[in-house]
Image: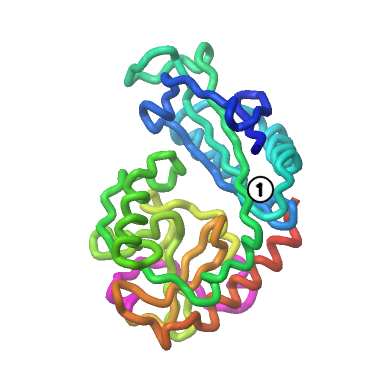
């Protein structure tokens, strides 16, 4: 049975409890991060900690603990649950004021709720999907306009995943004003004539931690990168496509809305970026 962390305590998962008045439950008033674990070490923890701090600040939410305390909790959970490869999920909400109210509670009297748990994913870096590639569909992007804040408002992305599943595909890319924003839980990219193209950072997409690292590694490898909007039609005509996220790293996309890219197998750019990302990230894992 897993050991989880709830508000300062390490508990068996079946003993963990959060109030029914918690604003994360009632209002989706919370933020989260997911950090990958490879070989028992945390991948890009600093990046996730910095983004968490930003998300909390954007929502005027009090931090639940320091970065150092957060790292200690992550490491303790990895050790207690004997995680070799997997994920650490972290969620912080505005807390449980004792009743339901749209107004924010006073942070001096209502402390934040903090929850962490692990997920064991043996062979996470060797996903079979990376060798065959993903199939995606396109759907309208009807989310709120602060997608740069990593909130727990994940209903529409979940619906998008189910739309893709119903269509016999793996994921969905969301479209707004004719342009691709991102995948349901990842950043989206296309490759044309060797150039990597991805949407620039704004409030319209999540500022992916893996995205930042992959683009940095791509530039260091002398790959050409262009940050701009692209349409789904342009994506269908691309040589390659891929997504990035903390749990999938770099994952090739081989089909978009039923249109096969290239010969229907991962090209050369995405697999190479995945290789570079995993190699370099493991060097800096803590």
The residue depicted at 45 percent of the width and 60 percent of the height is 187
Q: Dot 1: what SS?
A: helix
User: Measured along the vertical axis of the image, is residue 137 above or below residue 102?
Assistant: below
User: Measured along the vertical axis of the image, is residue 243 above or below residue 100?
Assistant: below
Q: Quadrant of the N terminus?
A: top right
- 121 horizontally vs 207: left or right: right
- Residue 25 percent across, percent down from the top left: 41, 28
Residue 261 visible? The answer is: yes
- 286 horizontally vs 274: left or right: right
Q: Is residue 235 magenta?
A: yes
Residue 235: image quadrant is bottom left
Residue 73: image quadrant is top right
The one nearer the camera, 173 or 126, is: 126
- How many badges with numbers are in the image? 1
The one nearer the camera, 160 or 243, is: 160
Q: How is this picture coloured?
A: rainbow
The residue depicted at 30 percent of the width and 71 percent of the height is 232
- Residue 39 percent across, percent down from the top left: 74, 57
- Residue 136 percent across, percent down from the top left: 36, 68
Residue 43 visible? The answer is: no
- 10 horizontally vs 23: left or right: right
Task: Tell which residue pokes out farthest to the bottom in this image.
Answer: 263
Identify the residue position indicated by label 1 in the image.
45
Report the span colored magenta. 215-236
Q: Is residue 110 magenta?
A: no
The residue depicted at 54 percent of the width and 79 percent of the height is 269
- Residue 61 percent across, percent down from the top left: 49, 28
The residue depicted at 50 percent of the width and 17 percent of the height is 107
Q: Residues within 10 Å of mark 1 (few under 14, many from 20)?
A: many
User: Measured along the vertical axis of the image, is residue 97 above or below residue 246?
Assistant: above
């Amino acid at each position: 049975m897993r050991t989880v962390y709830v508000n300062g305590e390490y508990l068996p998962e079946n003993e963990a409890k959060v109030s029914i008045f918690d604003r994360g439950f009632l209002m989706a008033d919370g933020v989260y991060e997911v950090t990958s674990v490879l070989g028992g070490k945390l991948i890009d923890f600093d990046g996730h900690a910095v983004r968490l701090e930003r998300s909390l600040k954007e929502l005027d939410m009090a931090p639940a603990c320091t970065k150092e305390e957060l790292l200690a909790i992550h490491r303790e959970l990895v050790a207690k649950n004997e995680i070799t490869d997997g994920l650490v999920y972290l969620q912080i909400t505005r807390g449980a004021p004792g009743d339901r109210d749209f107004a924010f509670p006073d942070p001096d009297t209502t402390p934040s709720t903090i929850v962490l748990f692990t997920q064991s994913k043996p062979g996470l870096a060797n996903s079979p999907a990376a060798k065959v590639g993903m199939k995606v569909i396109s759907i309208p992007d009807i989310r709120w306009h602060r997608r740069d804040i990593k909130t727990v408002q994940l209903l529409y992305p979940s619906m998008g995943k189910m739309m893709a599943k119903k269509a016999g595909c793996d994921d969905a890319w969301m479209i707004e004003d004719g342009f691709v924003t991102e995948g349901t839980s990842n950043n989206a990219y296309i490759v044309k004539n060797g150039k990597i193209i991805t949407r620039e950072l704004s409030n319209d997409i999540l500022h992916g931690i893996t995205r930042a690292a992959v683009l940095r590694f791509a530039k260091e490898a002398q790959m050409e990168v262009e940050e701009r909007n692209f349409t789904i039609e342009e994506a269908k005509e691309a040589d390659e496509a891929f997504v990035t996220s903390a749990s999938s790293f770099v994952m090739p996309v081989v089909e978009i809305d039923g249109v096969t890219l290239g010969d229907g197998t991962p090209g050369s750019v995405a697999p190479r970026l995945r290789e570079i990302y995993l190699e370099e990230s493991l060097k800096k894992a803590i």
